[in-house]
Amino acid sequence: MNKEASVAMPAPRALLSRATRETLANYTYLLPAAICLGGTVLFPILKAIHMSLYHNVLSRPQDYRFIGLGNYLRMIHDPTFWLTLKNSFVWVICSVSIQFVLGFLGALFLNAEFKGRAFLRTLNLLPWIIPGVVVGLVWEYLYQPNYGPVNDILRRVGLLTVPIAWLSQPAFAMASVIFANIWRGIPFFSIMILAGLQAIPDEVYEAATVDGASVTQRFWHVTMPMLRPIIVVATATRIIWTFNYADLIFVMTSGGPANATQITSSYTLLTAYTDLDFGYAATLSVILLVIMLVFTAFYLKFTKGVESVSG
Amino acid sequence: MKRQGSGDLLERILGGPVLWAGLALMTLFAMGPFLWALSASLKTRVELYATPITYIPTHPILRNYVEAWTSRLTPFSVFFANSLWVSSVTMVATIVISTSAGYALARFRFIGKNTLMLVFLATQMFPAVLLIPPLLSQWYALGLIDTYQALIYSNFSFTVPFTVWMLVGYFESIPHELEESAMIDGSSRFGAMLKIIVPLAAPGIAATAIFAFVSSWSELLFATTFTSSTNMRTLSAGLLYMAGQYEVQWGQLSAGVMISTVPVAILFTFLQKHLIKGLTAGAMKG
């Protein structure tokens, strides 16, 4: 379509104009995506930063006013915020580490050759793909003190005499939501590590076997080093994702009892959703973003190191 | 783990009993909660609250499904239609937007292209809660609260970056000589993209389409905050609303859970191979 236009112009200018025009045409391919992300990601983030500088409780519009860093000061003096940070830490560490170990085991099992492997893989990966609200509600039902199966099974095995209200006793609530989250996240690690395992050429194992390496030696000296890049990426992605993930807690406990399961992202959500305090919710979400960015920066630095080591 | 031609005892144990026990336990753990929900969805009201609890319904019935589907308070037929519409439109629009952007990023030189790719990837990691206050006030100002558009536009925030990122990889794997020869034959760049590259990338595009559909189908927070009337709720928001009722109807709720789960489970079986490839492509390069 540029052809006719460039023919009609003097040669040197046409060349320049054509190049410029092509560049412009190239940018139009990006335009829809740019508008989309501008409107749903970039602008909202700037808007959130702006909102964090205002006292903005939706139910009290008459109090709306600019308060500068007031919300940030409030956050520093908010004991619940610090509690949620601590809870987030427990939530992330426990969820991700156990997901990793079980997901790794799962990947090793699913990498073996047997009949019906594709079918079993699909079954085992399902918890990861279903809606978060489904995970939350089904586990809420499983934990139900009187007619939920968790108590029933524990009683039948003889581990329990009195039913436990898993989600409403502070001592058990966090462990219970973490357990549900582990169930949901195992397949993620299985998928990633399975792909990593399949990328290791058979010849490497054959060579190691010929050299007399035992199965454990092969695991530690062939499998693990070759999986290292994918393990780093998967774990880092998962840490960030789990830190930000509010759905499960929102559905199962709303952060209760007495904030025992409140993590920073669910606290942010409830500050907006229940308290309608958008100024403070925006402040908390800006802090979530900052934590995420700091972690990503460290992660990128670290993976650069991994890349240069491995190749 | 099982490789032929080795006499290692440990290996035989690992490849035999340990493997089978592990697979059985793992699959039982993964499927248990689904089976419980399926069983509960088929129970009568009496059996749901009976002690001791039963694991296999004695007289399986479909009444919970019928009641959930036709209920006036929580009409799953409406929720289902809403989810289907929102997810389908999100999917189609995402694919159009991302194919164009993915193609451009794979083929053209841009200033700051690598940074842009990094931003696309990082967007995946943004906390969804960050977007809720600003998006809510934005949709409110535009009069879009309680509309499909608000949900569809909001869904772009997570579908577009990931699908662009995945599609760039697919397009890069297609030799650029293919559309160049079409362009020499007189086709425009855009025409060559549509006629040559899109058909070749069809499997990748289909996989990203399913990804966009499944993730929109599962989306909860936007659907809950940006809609308020029952008729606008998606399945996720409808389920949460149902669970918040004074007395939870576990039978109907379990039926709702199955209605929400089965479509994505079916799609996932098709998607699995491609999604795994796409997900791990970035990681494997390192």
Image (cartoon, rainbow, N blue to C red):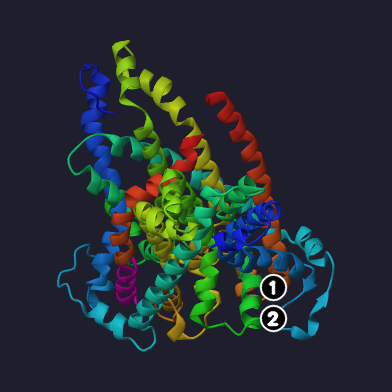
Any part of residue B52 in sight: no
Q: Amino acid at mark 2?
A: Leu
Q: Residue at x 52, y 78 (%)?
A: B149
Looking at the image, which is closer to me, A261 or A240? A240
C-beta proximity under 8 Å, tags 1 and 2: yes
Closer to the N terminus: mark 1 or mark 2? 2
Percent position (x, y) of residue B150?
A: 54, 77
Question: What is the chain letter for disc 1?
Answer: A
Q: Residue at x 49, y 86 (%)?
A: B229
Q: Which residues are magenta?
A: B249-261
Main SS category, magenta section: helix
Q: Secondary structure at mark 1?
A: helix
For the residues marked 1 and 2, what is the alpha-carbon distance in whole angstroms? 7 Å
- Categorize mark 2 by other alpha carbons within 10 Å: few (<14), some (14-19), many (20+): some
The disc placed on residue A278 is 1
Q: Say whether residue A112 is left or right of residue B192.
A: left
